[in-house]
Amino acid sequence: MMRRFFLTFCLTALTGCAGAYAQGVVAITGARLLTVTHGVIEDGTVLVENGKITAVGTSVRVPAGARRIDAKGKVVIPGLIDAGDRLGLVEIPAEQVTVDSTEYTDPVQPELRVLDALNPRSELIRVARAEGITEALSTPAEGNLIAGQSALIRLNGETVEELVVKSPAALHINLGESSKQTYGSKGKPPDTRMGEIAMVRQAFLKAQHYREEQEAYARKQALLSPAGVGGQAQKQSGEGAKPGDESKPSAPPAHDLKMETLLQALDGKLPVVVGAHRLSDIEAALRLADEFHLRIILSHATAAWRLADKLAAKKVPVIVGPIQEEPSRMETLDTRLDNAAILHKAGVPIAFETSADNEVRELPLAVEYAIGNGLPEDAALAAVTINPARFFGLEDQLGSIDVGKEANLVVLDGPPFHVKTHVVTELIGGQVVDLTNHQTELFEFYRKKYGIQ
Amino acid sequence: MRVSRLPRRLLGVLLAAFAAALASPAADPPVVIKGATILTMAGKTIEDGTVLIENGKIVAVAQDVPVPANAVVIDARGKYLLPGLVDPHSHLGVYSLPGLQANSDGNEMTGDIEAQVRSEDAINTDDPEIPRAVSGGVTTLQIVPGSGNNIGGWATVVKLNGAETVEGMKFPNAPPSMKWAWGENQKRAYGSKGQPPGTLMGEAAIVRQKLYDAQNYMAKWKAWEEGGKKGAPPERNLQLESLADVLEGKVRVNIHSYQVNHFAALFRISDEFHFPITALHHALDAYMIAPEIARRHIGVVTFADSWGFKVEAWDAIPQNAYLLWKSGVTVSLHTDNPVIEERYYIEQASIINHYGMPDDAALAAVTINPARILGIERWVGSIEPGKDADVVLWNGPPLELTSKVDRVFIDGRVVYTQAGGFLPWRGRQAGVRLQP
């Protein structure tokens, strides 16, 4: 089995290197296509040109010179999206110099951007993509209350620019045990859940005030500087100004990066992903969303199954994960393997996250658990493709096998989310990607050294 | 050694066996599990097979077994019967759920050599993980101390039979076993405080010196005994006594270690002091020297695909178990619970299966192989006449993650059903209430 896997890979890699094909034209033919948005197409062909999907169906004409990938008997799915992990931020979790996932210096840091820390050359990216994961929401880790802005990345790129699909993708807030543990133990706020919510509310209130100050200043500027006669009007006004006069010219309010970021969330331009496990933390997240009209997406959401109807009524999407959340913390005692199934049945849009540093490749197996616990297979596939794409406003670009979308495609030798299924070929942005990594190289070396088949 | 705790241990074992014999299984009617695909782990799979259980033991395993008139017959058509899973490396009960400071009893972090401590003195028999573990098909565990110390202490082998006491959970005839650890953890724990060990050199030096101390201790006792036991005997030292047991080859030594340089140091110490190493645990780089490990008859207890979480785990590959198996090493998986939750033990086998290990070999790595490594293969790990009736009925192929445990038998008694949960704890509010 392994041998076939490697042989297949080597052939595709070699042909990829040959480069004798029509520029960027790839046709995957004869496959069972799980399109996600319009059902299953048997014996179908996907045509890829210049990184995009340009035709899907059973009677697609493959242009002469196109590189053909014969996928007869195989299954093609859109690349999987892990809606929450640390890819590009952490290399070896135990070694601090390689960890850029939590800025442990202040619990309120909306201004932090994952974008500024991403390492496209991370080996963890290569290991993850070998199992069919083509995109990931790389987020700040737990530990801070308002933790910063995530980036949605594709798992192929030499530079940060090539890696990033969208940044910022969302603002991240973590409720519950992590931030009070980080700061309370040092005698700093927050030390309780009360403190956490007070700090978040204060931050958003401050941002609202910041906007009021900016608007007041802008109004004043507009008053002082009518279009076309700005300089003169200001001068005249200045001559007549008295101490304390509101019309006195003044410096603009100082730009504040934290506040600018929070304003984007308050304006609904940036979704707010709220990490919460315990029921009460999820309720607190909903209160914050109501008070500040935030567009929230719940993350982890261990106890969300207990609030499924309410979340459905409020149309709050949920990123469930890790699927095999363990009851190892007080806040995760309510964990159930059918959390996703219950939420889906109630009508809550769901996605999945591994929440992992270096175990991102386990996403497909974790999804198998969710299916085994009642989640329909098509809903499971949507939860790792089109749903997360929608959550982050990328549904026109990612998440299904549709004309016009980025060609992130995975050819499998069996049904997805199955222990005995393997990735045969994978395209990211229309390019056939290298599926080797540090681990496959070591395996090959020692397998040959000891003459093992 | 005369003063070894082994005879007392043996006495305890005999008493427990006697008590168990008196207790009841004799009163139970025979149980027949009929129609399942029996994955015996003893060389063959029996389709549409029957297992007869009497007095807590497996009596017959075949396609056709005469059913005694008074037998309870369980229709298992379409289901799969597998031996109860055996986890040779768990911290269940010593790192009880949830992970609170109050539940942290796995590492005596007050000195690097803790040969004198025993996990049996810390096991919480109300760990809420117990019913979850059984719901995942796990029936036998070796509960080991943590890896913060080079010598962590004595391990305890238990059955998850729902007993209220540690004595009641203990695996009756399990040979004594000790947990050691080698590599980054000790350097990090002590070196960062300016205490030894701060390097791998320090780890080796500390352990070698301690083994010299144990030799000196043994010599002192020997002199006293050979001198006609005149005068007061030498003062007993629990730590050196425990290490003396190791030097006399009475203990199965299980060593947490990752890299080839760790293995090399351990082999040197083992050769120098003439005691065998039973198994290397975690051992993520074991595949690099698989033939040597096979030659030394050392077992390997490893993760399926955990990798890269620290430098010594950087070269881990998910085919470690596969390459070791191909090289003739007895290879087992483990959970290191709570690192991987006990209930997900079977997934470790599924993962190595995904990365090329054939079905039977993958399942052997969570049943008969760990039983061999613990020295309890005479009683558990396969479905064969004479063995303890610790068997698990799965509603689908066990390696598929959509399959669920239908029911679990320990010593011939049903302890878990999918509908009824963990039966021994029914009505007993043990520990924290968890979701099913």
Image (cartoon, rainbow, N blue to C red):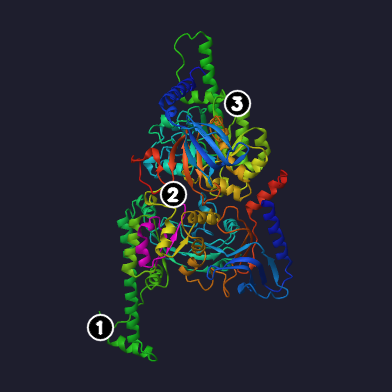
State the count of labels: 3
Q: What residue type is labelled 3?
A: Phe
Q: Position of residue B75 (x, y in %)?
A: 49, 42
Give the residue at mark 3: B273
Q: Distance between the residues labelled 2 and 1?
A: 67 Å
Based on the picture, tell me whether residue B289 belongs to the magenta stretch: no
Q: Which one is in front, A301 or A411?
A: A411
Name the residue furthest bottom: A228
Q: Are the two marked residues, 3 and 1, in contact with CB atoms closer than 8 angstroms?
A: no
The residues tagged by marks 3 and 1 sit, at their Cα atoms, a distance apart of 94 Å
Q: Dot 1: what SS? A: loop
Q: Does the magenta stretch include residue A299?
A: yes
> Which amino acid, by three-letter code, is at mark 1?
Lys
**Residue at point 67%, 73% (across, down):** A25
Question: Type of residue at label 2?
Answer: Glu
Foreground mark, 3 or 1, reads 3
Q: Which mark is residue A326?
A: 2
Q: How crowded is mark 3: few (under 14 residues within 10 Å), some or many (20 or more)?
A: some
Residue B339 coordinates in the image, percent (x, y)? 48, 45
Q: Using the rendered image, report if marks 3 and 1 lie on a common chain.
A: no
On the same chain: label 2 and label 1? yes
Judging from the image, mark 3 belongs to the subunit labelled B
Stretch in magenta: A296-324
Q: Distance between the residues labelled 3 and 2?
A: 42 Å
Q: Which residue is drawn at 35% across and 85% down?
A: A222
Residue under numbered circle 1: A242
